[in-house]
Image (tube, grey):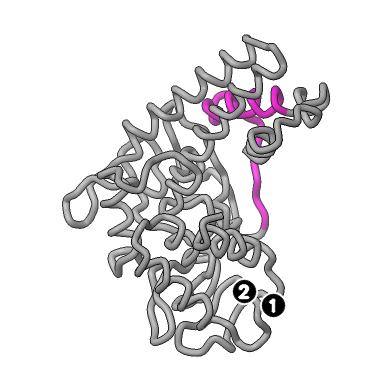
Amino acid sequence: LLAWKYYKVTGDTSVFTPEVKKAFLRVLDVMRIEQHHRRESNYRFKSGTQEAGVNPVTWTGMIWTGFRPSDDPCLYNYLIPAEMMAVQALQALKDIAGVYHDPAMAARAGKLRQQVHAGIQKYGIVQGPDGKPIYAYEVDGLGHANLMDDANIPNLLAAPYFGYVGIDDPVYRNTRQFVLSKANLFYYSGPLAAGLGSPHTPAGMVWPLGLLAQGFTTSDPAEQQRVLKMLLASDPGDHRLHESFDPHDPKKFTRADFGWPNAFFTEYIARLHGA
């Protein structure tokens, strides 16, 4: 996605070297293998108490995933936000294949994209706590679904940010309402902020990444400004955003130096100023 975005902005095709093409083709190989994880994949991981893939899955067209963006192991191994991002990446790769004049590569990317997208639509949309259809965070294709969202990106909240759905998509709107509510076990609030947290950090801690995803996925200027106010309120005095913070006391935080939300923040400010 980064390579595709760079190409679209600059028109520079020099980044698409033969070596890079080999990497793209290997990615396609791995994605196809992990569609059939139990049957074809040699990947296994166990470290301490963390083990990937202890629960069974069935064919869905989606790609098996061992770990969430937080590095925590998946409960169910079709991680819907990652599948959504894969759909976008595969569309980008189909476009990039045109630069390489490789219709076979384009066809592979296009077919895989269709299978993953169909899997999301068939297995990834479930009934939410209020009875409305929402996107699950994780599924296994066997009827189990994990209803939550995590501040780490890709997450469900950020789906419009990376282009999978529009902010007015009905299922996304239902999902957003669920994610930004107490029905989501990892939504926390305090006097200074309310937003997504993560099981990766202590309970009650709000993540600036989650707040930024909220700001990027609304067209309401008032909500955009509320997000900005909460981000500024998280500053403990070092004028940096952190991994997570206590919405009662910003001096309690995790990771003193975390470049991801700071980079995301600069993009958010540019967006607010129409850049």
Above or below residue 86? Residue 174 is below
Which one is nearer the viewer's eye here, 114 or 6?
6
Question: Where residue 143 appears, x then y in whole percent?
Answer: 30, 39
- Indicate whether residue 46 is drawn in magenta: yes
> Where does residue 270 sit, x and y in percent of width and height?
57, 60
Q: Find residue 80 and report its horizontal and vertical position in percent.
A: 44, 43
Q: Is residue 69 above or below residue 62?
A: below
Q: Amino acid at mark 1?
A: Ala
Q: Which residue is the site of mark 1?
A: 256
Outermost residue toward the left? 131
Disc 2 and disc 1 in contact, CB within 8 angstroms: yes
- Find numbered disc 2 in the image and state the secondary structure of the residue it sits on: loop
Query: Which residue is disc 2 drawn over?
Result: 242
Please name the amino acid that badge 2 sits on.
His
Magenta range is 24-47
Q: Quadrant of residue 107?
A: top right
At 30% across and 69% down in the image, what residue appears? 182
Q: Secondary structure at mark 1?
A: loop
Q: Is residue 20 left or right of residue 241?
A: right
> Does 74 appear above or below 268?
above
For the point 34% across and 61% down, the residue is: 220
Measuring 48% from the left and 49% from the top, which residue is drawn there?
161
Left or right, 59 with respect to 125, comes to right
